[in-house]
Image (cartoon, grey):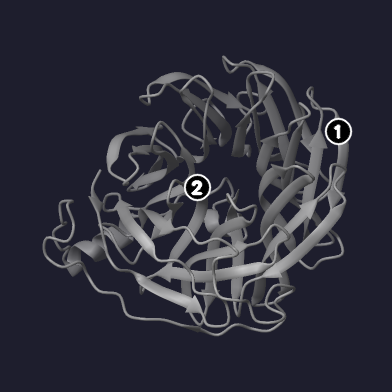
């Protein structure tokens, strides 16, 4: 795996908000085809990243362990002859890692939810295909967490009568299934996130479709999978819950909310123990924004990572709020191509942001890791009146040109230029990983 440092990047700031933080370093990783990160977690004085690595007409599940400065320590690619990818990784209490994703390489059927347990050095301890019978397809896993009682809970989707259903499966510490559940309504339903809650149960989040419109959906289940409550946020426009954390008073959720065609905002809301909405915010600017990664910061506020599409540009998007979801700062990071942030983790001196870029690196799309300086919700400039609430007014964006690194600026090996003929050949051969129905994953995420 090759890594390169590209400093500085284009940093686009929303002019009406407080200044967004600078990056401390960034790295790209990957080969000539599509590579990307879908999840990041703190692990052993560094970080573990799960994603995909494509080669021609197939993709493999990619795991990358890096040190605190982003230098690779080890990597693993797992998979077979089909499309395999990792969409969530968590550090386990035994020092290893649990990964959830999907695979259509193994068994007689098509796509299945795939759980992989690894030791601290990336060695496979066990793996399990979940969902249906051996010939079933249309299952996939988006999220996993470790249960307080032992074992792991995974969430994703399964085939339903008129679309997909929310799918939950609980396995023990050896990967043996204990129970599985399907939830949702008569149309399309999906779980993008799941957390083990302090009361011993589990909370899943995603969307449910009603009359052709997505509605943010939450489902709380007990230790054995019994439904405690379900909530759909039907008073919003198109929306989805994409990431969740537990807080003292309930749960905080980030995702997307479409206020009108071409105007999608980050949805940030807190719900109580029974799913009642305590507060909700629509944050962002002109164009489309979505929040895929969420963490609670040390000052009690929230840091959200995702993507923004505006004025023909797709960039990584970060925003910071106080503990009630009021906007402190927001900004974009990217280059001349397309970028997306899929996950975020707290670092000692900032935030680790994981995602994808096709502006920099060695391939058509590379895994991108940034360390961004930490700025507290109270430490920035005062917010302008009205910016902390519903973000009704469009926020204009401006930016500066990026430049390549100077000679000697990067300690990593610099990559040789690729000829235009070689690039055209790669364009004809490469493809991003897809879901079971052939959609690009970002479209599958509906972001």
Q: Which mark is residue 59?
A: none
Image quarter for residue 257?
bottom right
Query: Is 33 on the left or on the right of 82, as rendered?
Result: left
Residue 59 point in image, percent of width and height: 40, 43
Q: Nearer the viewer, mark 1 or mark 2?
A: 2
Q: Give SS at disc 2.
A: strand
Q: Which mark is residue 346?
A: 2
Q: Is residue 207 above or below residue 78?
A: below
Could you tell me which residue is drawn at 28 percent across and 57 percent down?
363
Q: Give SS at disc 1.
A: strand
Image quadrant for the C terminus? bottom right
Image quadrant for the N terminus? top left
Marks 1 and 2, how far apart at CA: 32 Å
Query: Is 377 on the left or on the right of 2, as rendered?
Result: right
Could you tell me which residue is drawn at 88 percent across and 43 percent down?
274
Q: Which mark is residue 227?
A: 1
């Amino acid at each position: 795996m090759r890594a390169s440092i590209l400093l500085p990047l284009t940093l686009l700031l929303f002019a009406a908000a407080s200044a967004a933080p600078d990056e401390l370093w960034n790295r790209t990783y990957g080969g000539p085809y599509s590579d990307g990160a879908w999840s990041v977690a703190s692990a052993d004085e560094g970080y573990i990243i799960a994603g995909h690595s494509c080669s021609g007409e197939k993709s493999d599940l990619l795991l990358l362990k890096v040190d605190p400065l982003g230098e690779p320590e080890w990597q693993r690619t797992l998979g077979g002859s089909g499309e395999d990818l990792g969409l969530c990784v968590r550090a386990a209490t035994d020092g290893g890692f649990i990964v959830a994703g999907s695979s259509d390489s193994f068994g007689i059927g098509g796509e299945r939810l795939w759980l992989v347990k690894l030791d601290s050095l990336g060695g496979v301890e066990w793996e399990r295909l979940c969902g249906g019978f051996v010939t079933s397809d249309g299952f996939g896993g988006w999220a996993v967490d470790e249960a307080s009682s032992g074992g792991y809970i995974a969430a994703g989707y399964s085939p339903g009568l008129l679309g997909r259903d929310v799918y939950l499966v609980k396995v023990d510490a050896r990967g043996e299934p204990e129970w599985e559940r399907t939830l949702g309504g008569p149309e399309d339903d999906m779980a993008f996130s799941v957390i083990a809650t302090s009361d011993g149960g589990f909370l899943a989040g995603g969307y449910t479709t009603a009359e052709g419109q997505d509605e943010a959906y939450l489902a709380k289940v007990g230790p054995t999978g019994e439904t405690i409550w379900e909530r759909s946020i039907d008073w919003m426009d198109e929306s989805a819950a994409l990431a969740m954390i537990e807080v003292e008073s309930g749960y905080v959720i980030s995702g997307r909310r479409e206020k009108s065609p071409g105007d999608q905002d980050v949805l940030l809301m807190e719900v109580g123990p029974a799913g009642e909405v305590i507060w909700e915010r629509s944050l962002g600017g002109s164009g489309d924004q979505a929040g895929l990664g969420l963490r609670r910061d040390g000052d009690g506020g929230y840091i959200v990572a995702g993507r923004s599409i505006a004025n023909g540009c797709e960039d990584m998007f970060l925003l910071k709020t106080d503990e009630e979801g009021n906007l402190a700062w927001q900004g974009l990071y990217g280059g001349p191509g397309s970028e997306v942030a899929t996950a975020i983790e707290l670092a000692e001196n900032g935030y680790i942001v994981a995602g994808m870029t096709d502006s920099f690196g060695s391939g058509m799309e590379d895994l991108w890791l940034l360390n961004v300086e930490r700025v507290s919700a109270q430490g920035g400039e005062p917010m302008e009146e009205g910016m902390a609430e519903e973000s009704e007014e469009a926020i204009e964006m401006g930016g500066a040109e990026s430049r390549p690194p100077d000679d000697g600026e990067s300690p990593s090996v610099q990559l040789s230029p690729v000829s235009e003929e070689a690039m055209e050949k790669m364009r004809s051969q490469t493809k991003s990983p897809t879901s079971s129905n052939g959609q690009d994953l970002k479209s599958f995420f509906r972001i």
